Image (cartoon, helix red, strand yellow):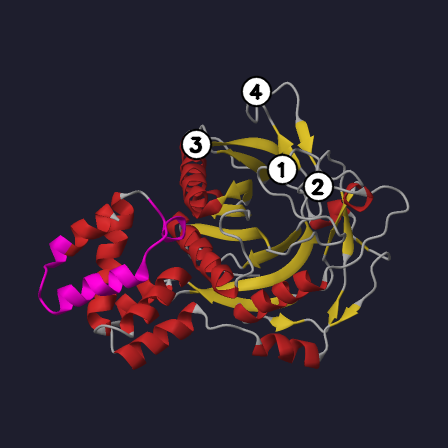
Amino acid sequence: MKRFTSEIIIGLEIHTEIDTKTKLFCRCQKAKKEDLPNSKCCPTCLGHPGSKPVLNKKAVEFALKLCLALNCEISPELIFSRKSYFYPDMSKNYQISQYEIPLGKNGKLNLRNGKEIGIIRVHMEEDPASLIHPAGLKESQYVLVDYNRSGNPLVEIVTEPDLASPDEARDFMKQLITVLNYLEIFDINEGIIKADANVSIKESGYTRVEIKNITGFKEIERALVYEVKRQQDELKHGKNIYQETRAWDSEKGTTFSLRKKETEEDYGYIIDTDLTVVEITDKWANQIKKEMPELAQDKVKKFVEKHKIKKEDAEILAAEKELAEMFEKVAKEIDPILAAKWLRRELVRVLNYNKKELHEVEIDEKHMIDLLKLVENKKITDNVAIRQKRKT
């Protein structure tokens, strides 16, 4: 049993959609946000009697890339199980997932401060349908179901309870999104990444409370800050903390109780005999390794050694794939130290000024290089260049 020493203990179960063209077990095209409800589904998505799942090989390859990037041990076999539960988001009353043998295990991912976070397992599963509550989670008198999302390929990443603050949980999700972005297996505009957070505080004797379905790294911090304070306030007023599952209401900024916490045994996992066991051969795994791109940590090392920039600058540039690629192009034309300084500080400042993320804007790289050449040759100042960039 793990011995806890932190005031707060947090473990995450992160579900990320992977960017294939079709669903995990059928030929349905994955729906886009603008598609009509229930327009991208078939008998397999809906679990009709007689329909048989067929595994999407590309989804497996993407999941293998993620396992390798997270330093996981790869299972020699891919085995799927049925996770049984009755809920309107899963019409066949079970979800195809993995239980006994995950695709990857015993991995790790470092936070920005260098702290290593252990990863228990990485496994594949299908996404349930979307439930729409027209008047809000608690106020709606009815729920709508959209099966467009049902059957989309997901990868679940389960961490060790190594996170000691909401800020660390946020940073872990940011680092994971960076990995997904470098691997090009996640659509940052259309894809969904959600987390279930297990949080315990020392004052309660580390009673575990789960918060379900938190979307994005900003919301994970908000939800955990609220939940830690809620537990502390309950204890101050002489109340107990019970092991339970709670939901996060992002509009109200609060959690509310859903049910007492289930155990894995409650789901009655059984091997899915409709899907054959897939062998992960050494040849296949080695081929995936050869296709692995440079990751953020590789970029940091290269930027420091090749371009002689500060490690802190290299880490900021490498944190976003688009920014790293832009730096490499600009650094071919001008002094890399000037390029690093300008991109990590001034460009980010301009983006913040316009309330934009880098992937949301189109930047004319030639114009930027020409602008920085003027700065490099002392024909204009940084301030003039910044004003020019704000206009574009």
Is 255 part of what is drawn in magenta? no
Residue pictured at 18% horizontal, 53% vertical: 386
Residue under label 1: 35
Residue 285 appears in which quarter of the rendering? bottom right
Question: Given contact means CB atoms under 8 Å apart, are the residues at marks 1 and 2 in contact?
Answer: yes
Taking depth in this image into account, of 175 and 39 the one nearest to the observer is 39
Q: Which of marks 3 and 4 is nearer the N terminus?
A: 4
Q: Earlier in the sequence, mark 3 or mark 1?
A: 1
The location of residue 344, given as percent across then percent down, is 26, 60
The kind of residue on which mark 2 rests is: Lys
Question: Given contact means CB atoms under 8 Å apart, are the residues at marks 2 and 4 in contact?
Answer: no
The kind of residue on which mark 1 rests is: Asp
Residue pictured at 66% horizontal, 33% vertical: 37
Residue under label 4: 139
Q: What label sits on residue 40 in the rendered view?
A: 2
Q: Which of marks 1 and 2 is nearer the N terminus?
A: 1
Q: Which of marks 2 and 4 is nearer the N terminus?
A: 2
